Image (cartoon, helix red, strand yellow):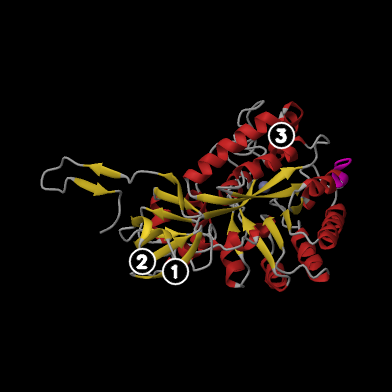
Amino acid sequence: MSADLLVTNATLPDGRTGVDVLVANGRIVNVAPRIDATAAKTVDAHGYLLTPPFVDAHFHMDATLSYGLPRVNESGTLLEGIALWGELKPTLTQDAIVERALTYCDWAVAKGLLAIRSHVDVCDPRLLAVEALLHVREKVKPYLDLQLVAFPQDGALRSPGAMEQLKRALQMGVDVVGGIPHFERTMRDGAESVRLLCELAAEQGRLVDMHCDETDDPHSRHIEMLAMESLRLGLQGRVTGSHLTSMHSMDNYYVSKLIPLIHEAGVSVVANPLINITIQGRHDTYPKRRGMTRVPELMAAGVNVAFGNDCVMDPWYSLGSGDMLEVASMGLHVAHMTSQTGMRACFDAITVNGAAILHLEGYGIAPGNHADFVLLQARDPVEAIRLRAPRLLVFRAGRVVAQTPAATATLDLPGRPPTVDWMLRR
Ligand SMILES: [Zn+2]
């Protein structure tokens, strides 16, 4: 067998050191200490961290990089963001959406982010964004896995025609059934939308990912309905509740019953730390709530929790760059997950946990899997988060698709070494 790539002396996220990784035909064929083989290309990892690619479990690629169009969100609230997006929608062109999305995908690849689940708004009867992102999905396929969710931004029931447009988007090739029960007119309509959308997913064998309870209102409990419908329809392992910010404000007793239900129903959870800390709590004076869902408690109960980026430079959020290490850093701060175990769990939330939500095939550094991985200028996951470590090399199918030079400072200090490797502890 002729190998294409041999990476030597890598550290893996699980703590194994001195590991070699051998690649042939785009797949990993061996992972072991000191592999005795020759390959067309050899890369010495110098003991740095080799991680599976970052996964963004929740994004909006139809809106990304539109910040300031047609104006900025002055209040910073979710509702003004939705209104602003409504103003922008009629002026969108397919070419502009494609152009912005492709630019964002370039940023993502440079940051080692090679799998994204993006919601796409289906409330525009022209379905322009759907057509645009289906085109983008094909175009980026060689270097990035883009999964699309049919997302009725203005409400599946509240927005006229949304349900039919959502079904049309699925027929056109969109992958996953979305929803937004807390934006329907009433709690009852919200619950009804969850039922109808889950039934649609069950009929068509689709995954489900709903924006669920993205509010500070502790009485927004659509996640309960989502879990119940998952159980009723046998959708365990196929359903995700995104945001769940109301859980931050819920009564503790109620949550002690809710979390086991989410676990029993096999529902995964996506928190979006940058956006949740920014958008929630906007009606508070002081103290201001953080708004992020109960990440460590969900994880402790065995629920699969991933982090999403949600927004980068769009009507809801003016910052961001596609850096999942920034997302993990915010998540661990907001959730007080500062123990070693907590910080490593936050690294999992931007890698393996997201991969499980997307049902990615062949993900991870193990024989038989895709040769997709990222070499970071860090020695372990905690250091990677602390430094937002440079992505020295990003590999897709064993080929380098992006590289960033190592960060090194040159010093001129009496009695001190001439350079420092970018803030790595010796
Ligand atoms: Zn979202």
Determine if residue 212 is in view. Answer: no
Residue displayed at 10% across by 47% down:
415
Measuring from the top left, give residue 310's x and y in whole percent. Answer: 62, 47
Question: Would you name the residue on which mark 2 appears?
Answer: 37
Q: Position of residue 149 (x, y in %)?
A: 72, 50
In the image, is residue 390 part of the stretch drawn in magenta? no
Q: Give the mark nearer the N terminus: 2 vs 1.
A: 1
| Extent of the magenta region | 158-164
Check disc 2 and give the amino acid type: Ala
Q: Amino acid at mark 3?
A: Trp
Q: Residues within 10 Å of mark 1 (few under 14, many from 20)?
A: some
The three-letter amino acid code for the residue at tag 1 is Asn
Left or right, residue 376 beside residue 328: left
**On screen, residue 235 above or below 139:** below
The answer to which of marks 3 and 2 sits earlier in the sequence is: 2
Numbered disc 3: secondary structure: helix
Element at label 1: strand
The disc label shown at residue 85, or none? 3
Residue plotted at (74% across, 31% down) = 89
Circle 2 or circle 1, nearest the eye: 2
Q: Residue furthest left?
A: 415
> Mark 1 to mark 3: distance in Å?
48 Å
**Residue at image mark 1:** 30
Dividing the picture into quarters, in which one does residue 152 lie? top right
Q: Earlier in the sequence, mark 1 or mark 3?
A: 1
